[in-house]
């Protein structure tokens, strides 16, 4: 077979049942080889960025590896935003790019470009991939493909890119004599190398149990690393054994059902006020599989859970103590840690923290995400009411993908997640436009099961061309556009810091959005509008019952705020709108920091 035929066979062997592509001359041989197979479906996208985002979601929920094919030059560079999504969220994806023939390459010269559309994509993506390489000899093709997939799917996972010149694609390939990649028998530092039988891990768990035994106000944080390790059941076993309040970051919103008695809420800069008070007043924090980044801790890490001992479990050594002072760092895969910890807990006397749990329950009840005044909205849809009611209409097995900006905040703050409902976003890179192609990738990975996509008017315009892909595939995706005709999250930032000068963020400042229902009609997609709170339930149900794709235009006020929100420089327990002094101080068990007035 030829090199391109080997690539197609390799994808089949690694269960890439769908391959996402925007074709071009430099990748045409591989595209043809993949398309001629009956066991792989070639899925054509309108933009390589969207194809990479679809591959990201496909890997999150499918059995196989999300894969893209793209041509050289602009085709390859257009993948970068989607590749970054996978890198920062630790998602294994494979990106195969075409390249000019080896003899036309500028490698080893000082010439800017030799071949047409020649671009050194490998150097560009190295900082955001687990592995990136250009194949320059046909005998190396097998080695590089195997190495790329191994590295993408081992340790802290992530994307890989293999750049295959056109002449390599066409050359005869002998699998039997080709160089083979032999995987290391054990991973080293930074790859979560400790096993459940490791004496070091057991020693570290013994020390963690000593800290837990002393705790009076503990909390548990479960991050997206738990799902990456496929350890959801083990995490819930830990929760049941410890009986401590549980908090989740955005990347793991669906890890614990929201009606679970120990579930508090999501925490952080845009977190629930009650959850923020719980984490800030704790005296022990056990974090498993979460990066604890600035969106969670606030801008000054010294203020986060500042009087708590911190046990932090992460597969990547570099994440441990990168900003926070961690009392007890444990470099380990979340699944390995949880299995070993649960065995140890079977013979451990967990401290009784009933009084603390009662206080946390008070925080949760006192500061709900959706308040009575939200239901009084007239002439528009209140996004918190919308989020809450959508959550109530979901059923186990439903999947929700949420874009970025204000849409992400409103949905994640107000959404009530039932057991068995999946919710995800590109949490780390968080680009506008991710949700629409990601919904298609997830839908294909799940055998064409319906997916609910929530995206802002600004975000939709970044990948609006993918309505054509959606129409071509006729997938049962419900696209809800939270339409405030502005960049709401930026306007709120401009209110706080830039004198409410809305440059490039609303119609007067240079931003505007089209008639999305007319756009949907041009693509042959049905549409619905929701313009009041009273219409939410019946029209969402109408959209869910629609057999094919449908766009739902959800009309929101242009001055709708995101609340609560921690302003820059404040600790996350003191979020805006700020509480009166007497109420705020009554909530604090740790020493309060000086308050910065709004």
Image (cartoon, grey):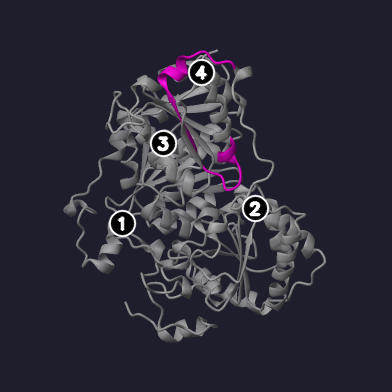
- In which quadrant is the N terminus drawn? top right
Residue 345, image x and y in percent? 77, 64
Q: CA distance from mark 4 to mark 3?
A: 19 Å
Residue corresponding to mark 1: 488
**Outermost right residue:** 347
Residue holding disc 3: 122
The picture places residue 245, in percent across and down from the top left corner, at: 63, 68
Residue 165 badge:
none
Disc 3 from disc 1: Cα separation = 36 Å
Residue under pointer 2: 333
Disc assigned to residue 3: 4
Magenta range: 150-174
Q: Is residue 157 left or right of residue 239?
A: left
**First in residue order: circle 2 vs circle 4:** 4
Check if residue 511 falls in the magenta segment. no
Q: Nearer the viewer, residue 382 or 401?
A: 401
């Amino acid at each position: 077979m030829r090199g391109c035929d080997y690539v197609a066979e390799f994808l089949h062997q690694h269960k890439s049942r769908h391959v996402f592509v925007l074709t071009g001359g430099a990748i045409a041989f591989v595209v043809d080889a993949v398309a001629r197979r009956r066991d792989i479906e070639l899925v054509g996208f309108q933009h390589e960025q969207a194809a990479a985002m679809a591959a990201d979601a496909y890997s999150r929920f499918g059995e196989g590896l999300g894969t893209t094919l793209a041509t050289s030059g602009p085709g390859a560079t257009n993948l970068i935003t989607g590749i970054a999504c996978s890198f920062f969220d630790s998602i294994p994806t494979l990106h195969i790019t075409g390249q000019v023939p080896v003899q036309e390459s500028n490698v080893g010269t000082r010439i800017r470009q030799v071949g047409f559309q020649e671009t050194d994509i490998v150097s560009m993506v190295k900082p955001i991939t687990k592995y990136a390489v250009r194949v320059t000899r046909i005998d190396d093709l097998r080695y590089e493909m195997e190495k790329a997939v191994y590295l993408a799917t081992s340790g802290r996972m992530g994307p890989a890119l293999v750049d295959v010149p056109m002449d390599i694609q066409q050359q005869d390939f002998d699998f039997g004599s080709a160089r083979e990649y032999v995987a290391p028998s054990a991973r080293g530092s930074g790859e979560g190398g400790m096993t459940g039988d490791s004496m070091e891990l057991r020693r570290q768990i013994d020390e963690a149990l000593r800290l837990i035994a002393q705790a009076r106000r503990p909390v548990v944080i479960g991050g997206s690393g738990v799902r990456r390790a496929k350890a959801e059941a083990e995490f819930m076993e830990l929760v049941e054994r410890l009986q401590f309040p549980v908090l989740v970051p955005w990347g793991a919103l669906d890890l614990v059902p929201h009606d679970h008695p120990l579930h508090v809420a999501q925490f952080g800069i845009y977190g629930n006020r009650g959850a923020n008070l719980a984490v800030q007043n704790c005296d022990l924090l056990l974090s498993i599989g979460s990066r604890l980044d600035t969106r969670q801790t606030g801008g000054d890490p010294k203020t986060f859970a500042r009087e708590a001992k911190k046990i932090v479990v992460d597969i990547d050594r570099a994440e441990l103590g990168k900003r926070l002072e961690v009392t007890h760092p444990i470099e380990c895969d979340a699944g390995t840690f949880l299995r070993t910890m649960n065995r140890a807990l079977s013979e451990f006397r967990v401290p009784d923290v009933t009084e603390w749990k009662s206080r946390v329950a008070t925080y949760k009840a006192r500061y709900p995400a959706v308040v009575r005044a939200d239901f009084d909205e007239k002439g528009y849809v209140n996004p918190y009411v919308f989020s809450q009611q959508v959550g109530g209409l979901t059923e186990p097995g439903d999947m929700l993908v949420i874009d970025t900006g204000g849409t992400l905040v409103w949905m994640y703050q107000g959404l009530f997640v039932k057991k068995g409902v999946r919710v995800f976003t590109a949490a780390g890179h968080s680009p506008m436009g991710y949700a629409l192609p990601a919904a298609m990738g997830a839908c294909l990975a799940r055998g064409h099961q319906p997916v609910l996509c929530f995206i802002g008017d600004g975000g939709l315009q970044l990948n609006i061309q993918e309505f054509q892909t959606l129409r071509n595939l006729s997938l049962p995706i419900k696209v809800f556009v939270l339409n405030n005709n502005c960049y709401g999250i930026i306007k709120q930032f401009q209110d706080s810091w830039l004198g409410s000068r809305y440059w490039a963020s609303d119609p007067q400042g240079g931003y505007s959005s089209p008639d999305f229902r007319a756009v949907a009609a041009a693509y042959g997609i049905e549409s619905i509008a929701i313009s009041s709170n009273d219409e939410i339930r019946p029209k969402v149900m109408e959209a869910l019952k629609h057999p094919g794709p449908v766009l739902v235009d959800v009309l929101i006020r242009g001055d709708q705020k995101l609340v609560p929100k921690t302003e820059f420089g404040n600790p996350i327990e003191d979020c805006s709108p700020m509480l009166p002094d007497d109420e705020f101080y009554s909530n604090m068990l740790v020493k309060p920091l000086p308050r910065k007035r709004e």
